[in-house]
Image (tube, grey):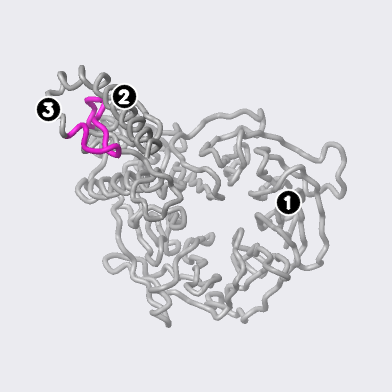
């Protein structure tokens, strides 16, 4: 009895001290805002505490109290409860998710209302034409700025997908999409509801106004293993196969698989349905196909502390030991180099003419502060662009090994997210872990566009995108394709 009364008195003194402290912090600010509050409201319970700031927007001026959350709408603090309680509606995770969803809906509403967006101050179609006529812009700058203007005006259109199995389209979620060289086909990896992955190829020839219809060519090939990396492979002809790195499961080891595109749709005259070709390569994180004549019919795989270069025809392999996991790869076209991005943050090039690992087999070395998730070589092969798990995107000069530009705004913490560079249009495209698609100017790093996801943000629903100046083939129009959950969206040039 005495013990319980002592606890109640102690709890009462603690509550009075907390209320007194909050009143002292907020008394001066109540005068500035004219907010009126009765004593009954301030003492109603321990879970609700008066606001200590006049801010109604949740700005940095609001002090951060441990164990409490400030609601800018109600202008009050609320006590946070332990996050392990699934029934608790007020945890840091749920609050962050609510704020992200509110921001996404606001941006979607702005996207629908504002048809013409301005990427730069004082920059529009009329001013661009006037400067071009007066000779203030050369042809290159005019084309680049025209692309930026049209990118800012792209509007979202939903694409109708036709398939022989419509029920599967309603249940299978898009995991990733990858356009081929001519941008007339999309290879898709879909997560099946019962578990595992299913592959397909979408023909983009019907991607025209006003219908925006495409056809999904599916195959019964199904795997219950995770797909770590995908790229198009030119074995018989351009983009004749798809190279996939599959993770091992249980007693089944990981492998690299060459999947003929003719298994889905026979788009090349005289092509016969090919056979699957698998190479036992356990633990492959990344893969790349070589278009270099000095490494003909070869592909590379990045493993944990190893790089393998395999000849598909002869089966001959070259192996290079590394000090870290290789998460991203790309072959150069004009020089016999293979660029690799590692978990340690190192980017290095391998001269594929080397038959042994001498002391100087690393041709170029660059360094990021976090794990490198994507590497892209520019056309002249004098620059390389890379992104990492800290959300940093850098443009490197391969001759001087110095960073030329850095692109701000990308969000990444731990995911292997791709980077898309399009020199013809002068833009850089990346999707962050916050599910926002961002488009930058390649020339001066200016953020041109931030596109919210049409679906609620989630770490498992990160959109996959493909951008091309000729979506649907050589006669196609420029635009962006976005796959999220079961839907495919098209952002055409207006």
Find the magenta span and give its range.
Answer: 41-56
Within-10-Å neighbours for mark 2: few <14, some 14–19, many 20+:
few
Rendered location of residue 125, percent (x, y) = 25, 39
* CB-based contact (under 8 Å), mark 1 and mark 2: no
Q: Outermost residue, front direction?
A: 1
**Which label was assigned to residue 17?**
2
**Circle nearer the N terminus (2, 3):** 2
From the viewer's perspective, is 316 left or right of 1? right
Q: CA distance from mark 1 to mark 2?
A: 56 Å
Q: Quadrant of the N terminus?
A: top left
Rendered location of residue 247, percent (x, y) = 66, 63
Q: Is residue 394 above or below residue 484?
A: above
Q: Tell me which corner region of the image, top left, top right, bottom left or bottom right, holds residue 377.
A: top right
Residue 333 shows up from this direction: no
State how many labels appear: 3
**What residue is pinned by disc 3?**
36
* CB-based contact (under 8 Å), mark 1 and mark 3: no
Residue 435 shows up from this direction: yes
Q: Is residue 42 magenta?
A: yes
Q: Is residue 107 magenta?
A: no
**Circle nearer the N terminus (1, 3):** 3
The residue at 20%/17% (across/down) is 28
Q: CA distance from mark 1 to mark 3?
A: 63 Å
Q: Secondary structure at mark 3?
A: loop
Give whichever of 321, 115 is nearer the camera: 321
């Amino acid at each position: 009895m005495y013990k319980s009364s002592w606890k109640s008195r102690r709890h009462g003194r603690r509550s009075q001290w907390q209320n007194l402290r909050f009143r002292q912090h907020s008394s001066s600010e109540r005068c500035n805002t004219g907010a009126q509050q009765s004593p009954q409201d301030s003492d109603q319970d321990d879970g609700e505490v008066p606001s200590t700031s006049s801010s109604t927007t949740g700005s940095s001026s609001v002090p951060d109290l441990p164990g409490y959350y400030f609601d800018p709408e109600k202008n009050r603090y609320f006590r946070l409860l332990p996050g392990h309680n699934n029934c608790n509606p007020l945890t840091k995770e749920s609050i962050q998710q609510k704020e992200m969803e509110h921001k996404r809906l606001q941006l979607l509403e702005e996207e629908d209302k504002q048809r013409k967006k301005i990427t730069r101050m004082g920059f529009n179609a009329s001013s661009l034409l006037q400067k071009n006529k007066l000779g203030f812009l050369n042809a290159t700058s005019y084309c680049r700025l025209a692309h930026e203007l049209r990118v800012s005006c792209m509007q979202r259109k939903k694409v109708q997908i036709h398939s022989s199995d419509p029920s599967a389209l309603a249940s299978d979620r898009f995991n990733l999409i990858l356009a081929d060289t001519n941008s007339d086909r999309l290879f898709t990896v879909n997560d099946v509801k019962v578990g595992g992955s299913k592959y397909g190829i979408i023909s983009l020839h019907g991607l025209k106004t006003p219908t925006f219809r495409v056809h999904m060519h599916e195959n019964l090939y199904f795997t219950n293993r995770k797909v770590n990396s995908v790229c198009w492979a030119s074995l018989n002809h351009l983009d004749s196969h798809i190279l996939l790195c599959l993770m091992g499961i249980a007693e089944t080891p990981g492998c690299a698989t060459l999947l003929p595109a003719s298994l889905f749709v026979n788009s090349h005259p005289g092509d016969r349905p090919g056979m699957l070709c698998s190479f036992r390569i356990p633990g492959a994180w990344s893969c790349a196909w070589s278009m270099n004549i000095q490494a003909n019919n070869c592909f590379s795989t990045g493993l944990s502390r190893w790089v393998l270069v395999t000849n598909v025809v002869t089966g001959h392999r070259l192996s290079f030991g590394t000090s870290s996991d290789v998460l991203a790869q790309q072959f150069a076209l004009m020089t016999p180099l293979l660029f690799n991005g590692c978990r340690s943050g190192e980017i290095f090039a391998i001269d594929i003419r080397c038959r042994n690992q001498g002391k100087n087999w690393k041709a170029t070395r660059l360094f990021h502060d976090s794990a490198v998730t994507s590497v892209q070589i520019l056309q002249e092969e004098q620059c390389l662009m890379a992104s990492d798990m800290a959300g940093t995107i850098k443009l490197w000069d391969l001759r001087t090994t110095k960073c030329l530009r850095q692109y701000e705004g990308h969000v990444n913490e731990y995911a292997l997210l791709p980077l898309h560079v399009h020199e013809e249009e002068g833009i850089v495209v990346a999707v962050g872990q916050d599910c926002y698609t961002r488009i930058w100017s390649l020339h001066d790093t200016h953020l041109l566009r931030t596109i919210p996801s049409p679906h609620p943000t989630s770490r498992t629903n990160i959109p996959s995108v493909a951008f091309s100046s000729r979506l649907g083939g050589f006669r196609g129009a420029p635009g962006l394709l976005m796959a999220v959950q079961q839907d495919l969206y098209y952002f055409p040039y207006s």
